[in-house]
């Protein structure tokens, strides 16, 4: 383990508030992991920016094990446990690697900041290289979507495709998103009887999923994220992307303007596929997991 005191003196490096809170968070995560596919293995890989923890899943079918693998990058303030609705379907068809991002709560250990686009791309490329992955379908949700889009812009060499699930990186994050985020956090403390109505109003499945609710609430108490919000890619930067892109947006997303982006992204990125999922907000991969899993696998199969 690194010198905790040394890490705490660095700006833009995330940390747990204490060992006790870290263990409480891990316990909450493990409860959620148990609802998804069973990991075949966990491993730590070293990068220039810290130790990256990765969960590996795989298909039972030997023929499927040779397919191009999937790498999952989660959203801000979370960890790979958020993929519990997706790992069973995805790993039934392909090898899957779920990556705990540096600077977010999880089992990775950050030592240097990675919020700058060049550093973020270097970190992810080093992680994939250490895992021996020369070719992957990269899937990113929310902040992980920014990481995936940034990778396609700066270091696309290992990417077979990129799937962006209601991602950051397309437009500046507005006040309405932060209001929604904090409203959802406060709603986790509401009486149990009110949570289903609040969940529907706020498009927050976390409120009616006890295990997910516990993980999110514990993360807020346990971990301090120290990076600034990433800036969106410019139109010129988006136009450089040549990797096949699949954009999935929630119809009531507050992170982006869905209709605007579903028209804009295919115009800027040649061949990009963009779709809007109805009856959902910022979490289509959770709210409509079966449908989104099916669409992602169809896209990957078409690319391959």
Image (cartoon, helix red, strand yellow):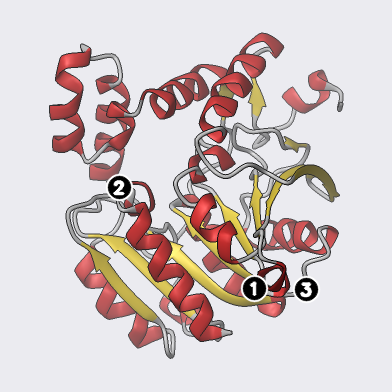
Find numbered disc 2 in the image and state the secondary structure of the residue it sits on: helix
Indicate which label's residue lies in the foreground, 2 or 1: 2
Looking at the picture, does residue 57 appear above or below residue 150? above
From the viewer's perspective, is 131 left or right of 288?
A: right
Residue 184 screen position, x and y as percent: 28, 29
Looking at the picture, does residue 218 appear above or below residue 184? above
Find numbered disc 3 in the image and state the secondary structure of the residue it sits on: loop
Residue 169: assigned label: none
Residue designated by label 3: 134
Whether the residues at callouts 2 and 1 have beta carbons within 8 Å, the answer is no
Residue 252 screen position, x and y as percent: 19, 53
Chain-order first, disc 1 or disc 3: 3
Indicate which label's residue lies in the foreground, 1 or 3: 3
Residue 270 screen position, x and y as percent: 43, 90
Chain-order first, disc 3 or disc 2: 3
Find numbered disc 1 in the image and state the secondary structure of the residue it sits on: helix
Q: Residue at x 22, y 14 (%)?
A: 192
Depth order, front residue of 43/11: 43
**Cα distance, mark 3 to mark 2?**
32 Å
Q: Residue at x 42, y 61 (%)?
A: 293
From the viewer's perspective, is 23 left or right of 28?
A: right
Residue 127: image quadrant is bottom right
Q: Which residue is at the far bottom?
A: 270
Residue designated by label 1: 154
**Cα distance, mark 1 to mark 3?**
16 Å
Looking at the picture, does residue 14 appear above or below residue 68? above
Residue designated by label 2: 287
The quadrant of the picture occupied by the C terminus is: bottom right
Residue 196 screen position, x and y as percent: 18, 27
Q: Residue at x 86, y 27 (%)?
A: 2
């Amino acid at each position: 383990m690194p010198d905790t005191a040394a890490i705490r003196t660095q700006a833009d490096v995330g940390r747990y508030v204490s060992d006790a809170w870290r263990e409480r968070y891990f316990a909450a995560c493990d409860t959620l992991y148990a609802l998804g596919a069973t990991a075949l293995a966990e491993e730590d890989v070293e990068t220039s920016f810290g130790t990256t923890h990765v969960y590996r899943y795989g298909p039972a079918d030997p023929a499927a094990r040779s397919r191009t693998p999937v790498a999952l990058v989660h959203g801000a303030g979370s960890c790979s446990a958020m993929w519990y609705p997706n790992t069973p379907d995805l790993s039934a068809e392909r090898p899957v690697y779920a990556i705990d991002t540096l600077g977010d709560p999880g089992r990775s250990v950050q030592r240097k900041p990675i919020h700058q686009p060049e550093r973020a791309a270097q970190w992810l490329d080093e992680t994939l290289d250490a895992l021996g992955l020369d070719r992957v379908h990269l899937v990113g949700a929310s902040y992980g979507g920014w990481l995936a889009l940034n990778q396609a812009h700066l270091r696309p060499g290992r990417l077979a495709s990129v799937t962006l699930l209601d991602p950051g990186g397309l437009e500046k994050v507005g006040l309405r998103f932060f209001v929604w985020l904090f409203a959802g956090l406060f709603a986790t403390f509401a009486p149990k009887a009110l949570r289903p109505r609040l969940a529907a109003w706020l498009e927050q499945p976390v409120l009616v999923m006890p295990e997910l609710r516990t993980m999110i609430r514990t993360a807020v108490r346990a971990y301090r994220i120290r990076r600034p919000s990433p800036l969106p890619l410019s139109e010129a930067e988006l136009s450089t992307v040549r990797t096949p892109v699949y954009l999935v947006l929630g119809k009531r997303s507050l992170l982006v303007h869905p209709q605007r982006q579903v028209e804009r992204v295919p115009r800027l990125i040649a061949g990009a596929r963009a779709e809007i999922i109805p009856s959902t907000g910022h979490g289509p991969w959770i709210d409509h997991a079966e449908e989104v899993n099916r669409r992602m696998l169809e896209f990957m199969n078409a690319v391959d």
